[in-house]
Image (tube, rainbow, N blue to C red):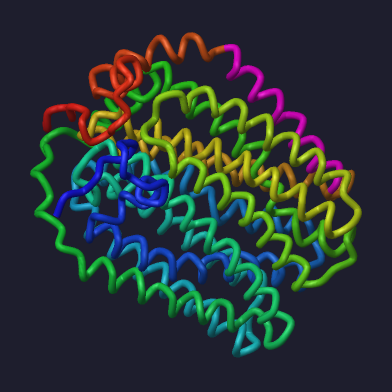
């Protein structure tokens, strides 16, 4: 069967957007994760509403967020070493199984009427521990699911669209279920949803993992990964901006129960639908990225997306009605996902495969590892000046971070262009050849 190369005459826009689906393993991964992520979003909304219902404390919302994410900050670098050394497929089977057990434990405690705040904190910390190993392995595993590197950016963008498509359904379902039967059913359905991703992983025909060096010590390999990550200008600046955004921008999600209840005067349905609007903006951003042929030029999109994100947060802080809040959060999410997915695509495109797990561990450390500190800060600020002012401060600081990145664009482009040229990405545009499949792929290690 002959496949049209993306971008050549006869190739439809839809074929371009969905080109990663030609790989069976990727289709399985996408389907299993898609079901599981709906459950994950249901649990996220139910967890935040449960904590605020039990305590009425914005600060405790921040504490729970901190406990759920701090293990990623501490352990991800070491997990990255393991992701470069061990079979990533097997790591994912273990982490997804443990996450399923965590969801079932939460469901039991809530449905039995025994849940206390310390249970939530302990189980959130356990899930954070699991995620610290899951994220580097999962991010690195994507490259094993697509045979051609020019399709990697598309696979990453489709992953983001899957994540945010689930974000449309999960929160809305959670809001309805919480109103009807309580939070426990959300946790139970999340536990059941993990069966889909576990079944998908077991059904994959994954080649035996390449033998990776095991003689070097963990700390030596960790130092090698750190030096590689922060000595290469594009990766360094992208991860630093991501860390800043995660610290001062992303924690706005922790404050949503407070914002919905105290500012909008709504309940769990309002929270669910507001988070679904956030997912709508994020999904639009992911689909826009999926239609791109390669990573060329994405470095310029990152600060623009940061400005959109910051502007959306400022607008959200001023919203006093559901329509205004819904529009603002959709804009903010569009900017956030544009920045995150663009960053991920560039890093995954240029990184050397034998260091991929460690680099993606630092990516996870920036993306999720800084969020716990931001959650505590946001909860504390909101408890002092209110959720709207806390969100306003986050938006202003996000604008400042994006502006600084703008000033580094020339340096970033000078460093990354030779890599694109070696991969065959830059010459495709320079000579007018747009068919990604005609590019010469780099030699395998």
In which quarter of the view is residue 243 placed? top right
Q: What residue lies at 23% left-to-right and 59% top-to-bottom?
A: 25
379 above or below 47?
A: above
Using the rendered image of the protein, determine whether residue 132 is visible from the camera's viewpoint.
no
- Horizontal side, residue 246 vs residue 193: left or right: right
Give the residue at x 88% y 61%. Answer: 264
Give the image location of residue 72, x and y in percent: 46, 47
Q: Quadrant of the C terminus?
A: top left
Magenta stretch contains residue 108: no
Dividing the picture into quadrants, the one containing residue 413 is top left
Q: Number of marks in the image?
A: 0
Residue 383 location, x and y as percent? 84, 50
Q: Is residue 19 visible?
A: yes
**Residue 116 percent coordinates (x, y):** 66, 75
Relative image position of residue 381 (x, y in whole percent): 81, 43
Boundaries of the magenta span: 388-407
Relative height, residue 40 to residue 303 (above, below): below
């Amino acid at each position: 069967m002959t496949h049209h190369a993306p971008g050549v005459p006869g190739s439809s826009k839809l074929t371009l957007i969905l080109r990663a689906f030609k790989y069976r393993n990727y289709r399985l991964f996408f389907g299993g994760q898609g079901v599981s992520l709906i459950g994950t979003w249901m649990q996220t909304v139910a967890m935040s509403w449960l904590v605020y219902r039990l305590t009425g404390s914005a600060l405790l919302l921040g504490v729970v967020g901190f406990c759920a994410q701090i293990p990623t900050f501490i352990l991800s670098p070491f997990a990255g070493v393991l992701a470069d050394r061990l079979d990533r497929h097997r790591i994912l089977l273990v982490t997804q199984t443990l996450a399923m057990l965590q969801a079932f434990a939460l469901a039991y405690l809530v449905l039995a009427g025994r849940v206390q705040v310390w249970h939530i904190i302990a189980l959130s910390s356990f899930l954070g521990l699991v995620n610290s190993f899951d994220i580097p392995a999962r991010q690195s595993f994507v490259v094993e699911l697509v045979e051609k590197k020019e399709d990697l950016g598309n696979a990453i963008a489709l992953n983001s669209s899957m994540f945010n498509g689930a974000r449309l359904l999960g929160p809305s379902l959670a809001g309805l279920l919480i109103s009807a039967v309580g939070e426990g059913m959300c946790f139970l359905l999340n536990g059941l949803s993990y069966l889909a991703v576990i079944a998908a992983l077991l059904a994959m025909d994954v080649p035996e993992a390449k033998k990776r060096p095991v003689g070097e010590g963990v700390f030596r390999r960790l130092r090698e990964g750190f030096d590689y990550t922060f000595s290469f200008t594009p990766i360094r600046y992208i991860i630093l901006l991501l860390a800043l955004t995660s610290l001062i921008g992303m924690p706005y999600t922790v404050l949503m129960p407070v914002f919905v209840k105290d500012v909008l005067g709504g309940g769990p349905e309002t929270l669910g639908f507001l988070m679904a609007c956030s997912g709508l903006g994020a999904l639009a951003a992911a689909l826009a990225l999926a239609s791109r042929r390669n990573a060329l030029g994405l470095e310029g999109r990152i600060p623009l997306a940061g400005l959109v994100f910051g502007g959306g947060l400022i607008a959200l802080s001023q919203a006093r009605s559901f329509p205004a809040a819904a529009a603002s959060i959709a804009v903010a999410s569009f900017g956030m996902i544009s920045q995150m997915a663009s960053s991920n695509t560039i890093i995954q495109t240029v990184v050397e495969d034998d260091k991929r797990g460690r680099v993606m561990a630092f990516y996870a450390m920036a993306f999720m590892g800084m969020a716990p500190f931001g959650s505590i800060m946001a909860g504390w600020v909101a408890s002092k000046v209110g959720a709207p002012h806390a969100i306003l401060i986050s938006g202003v600081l996000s604008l400042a971070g994006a502006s600084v990145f703008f000033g580094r664009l020339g340096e970033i482009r000078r460093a990354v262009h030779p890599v694109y040229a070696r991969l065959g990405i830059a010459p495709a545009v320079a000579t007018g050849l747009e068919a990604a499949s005609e590019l010469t792929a780099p030699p395998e290690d």
